[in-house]
Amino acid sequence: MNSKKADKIAVGVIYVMSAVIVLILASLLLFILWRGLPQISWEFLTAPAKSFQVGGGVGIQLFNSFYLLILTMLISTPLALGAAIYLSEYAKQNWLTDFVRTAIEVLSSLPSVVVGLFGFLIFVIQWDFGFSILSGALALTIFNLPLLTRTIEDSLQAIPATQREAGLALGLSRWETVTRVILPAALPGIITGMILAAGRIFGEAAALIYTAGQSAPALDFTNWNPQSITSPLNIFRPAETLAVHIWKINSEGVMPDGEQVSAGASAVLILAVMLFNLGSRYLGRKLQKKATSE
Amino acid sequence: MEETQSKFMQKSSKRKIEQFGRTISFICIAFIVLIVLSILYFVISKGVSTFTTDGVSVIDFLFGDIWRPGEVGENGEPLVGALPMILGSFFVTLLSALLATPFSIAAAIYMVEISPKAGKKILQPVIELLVGIPSVVYGFIGLTVVVPFIRSIFGGTGFGILSATIVLFVMILPTVTSMAVDALKSVPRHYREASLAMGGTRWQTIYKVVLRAATPGLLTAVVFGMARAFGEALAVQMVIGNAAMVPTDLITPASTLTSILTMSMGNTVMGTLENNVLWSLATILLVMALFFNILTRWIGKKGAMK
């Protein structure tokens, strides 16, 4: 009966430990939302931040986060797509491919602060872009490339080889097979991967504090001339994002209602990540349905 | 005749398209490799200049315990001992991994072996969501909940290695758990059936068969979590207190490589010793990332199921 007793005890311990985890994680989520949600209002989401007074919002930071996200995705998606196509369709099994794969793996394992420092050294100082949206977007691209490449490659690999053979048998070149047959079939997976990557980019801060900068100059949302410094579209203006804002408020500690603002901003971040998560699942399923039923 | 001949000699349009596509995709991959190589080159060459240009000895840097860049000691050597940060980084990484491993494996066992249904319905979505939570949010929670809590129990400021460990523990928990789940899931079903058929209890099956077979995968999960903890910057920086002193206990302010990097990089001038030593710290981070990478590969190779 000894082993039965041991079984009961061990399973009991596992139950307790799992319960502890659920408790920690669930209370973490609820805590963030419970503290943050009351702060969120239209005013909070659109008003500019105030450094030394109560009642600032996160409008500019929120816009910067989205703008950076879009720019980063615009730069990194074609690159990752090309790289993934090469790895999945063209790469032969040899030392060169091994080397390339190792390089990508190394890039994905680099701490984001190192990527940020590299961006600081090259984009901000060497290329003289300064603390700007452009520097930030380039740093985030480096941060995003390895994972995006891998997810796209995985979704390309998931398409059965028979599809490729069918394309080739019809006299298409390999490239045409990829662009006309494989890519459309892999689209649901690719889009899911892109949205998940977007969630990661949206919350990244360490790679940005020395590239996109830690200040958010006032923007004039009626000025759409990309060359003007107050224009939201200008890519050479410093742009503090929402995640950087949270860090900045808490490490500086001069904002009188810093805790409330960070709580609200944290809740906005979490909601955005949730939205990205749910969105990727929903869209992935919907596209899958469309692709398979037609 | 001529016309036909030239048609055969020319590249077909298909061939041209093919070449175009192959070139484009190759350029993309070459670009990524170029980025990786230039990151390694620039960071390491900057980091090495502390030793080559400024003449600091590697031993003094790695084992010196006084960090006051900009000042010189009695012997005229600059005070740039990185030991406090190196120790801080290793302590928070090891402690948080030590704490997270049993919990993650327990949760993974629960989700795969004991109650797959409840695991899939409750734990899986929560964990997936938490993997995506930005690290500054963890830092903020640490600052408003963990630090005051530690302060009220142990006194002092509340900042320190213990707070950082707790924050990192919660942060790597979802990552390690979801990887551990994958490791357990990859154990073939007939292993369990064989054990149960021989009269093993559920726990005997889990402990003696499943966990043994999944060991390489579980180790990879833990190493991955450690790499994440080691490289995490902002969440740690917010709760550790950022005092560059050799840690003597867990509840006084300490610092890590990443925390000093984020604090100081903006306050130094490029090309000076104060700046170069920061790049040396970044080089240590980079080398450790490579080390974790090699470690996971080695585990994968050693433990590959035959």
Image: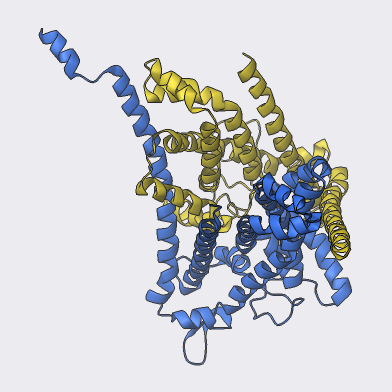
Q: Residue at x 52, y 69 (%)?
A: B281
| Horizontal side of residue A252 vs B9, given as left or right | right
User: In this picture, is B182 found above or below B266?
Assistant: above
Indicate the position of residue A290 as horizontal and vertical percent values. Answer: 64, 18
Indicate the position of residue A172 as horizontal and vertical percent values. Answer: 38, 18
Q: Residue furthest left?
A: B2
Q: Quadrant of residue B285?
A: bottom right
Q: Which sits in the foreground, B295 or B20? A: B295
Q: Colour of chain A?
A: yellow
Q: Which sits in the foreground, B55 or B40? A: B40
| Horizontal side of residue B277 vs B212, given as left or right | left
Q: Which sits in the foreground, A134 or B135? A: B135
Q: Which sits in the foreground, A71 or B147? A: B147
Indicate the position of residue B100 as horizontal and vertical percent values. Answer: 73, 62
For the C terminus of chain A, give its image quadrant.
top right
For the N terminus of chain A, give its image quadrant.
bottom right
Q: Which chain is blue?
A: B
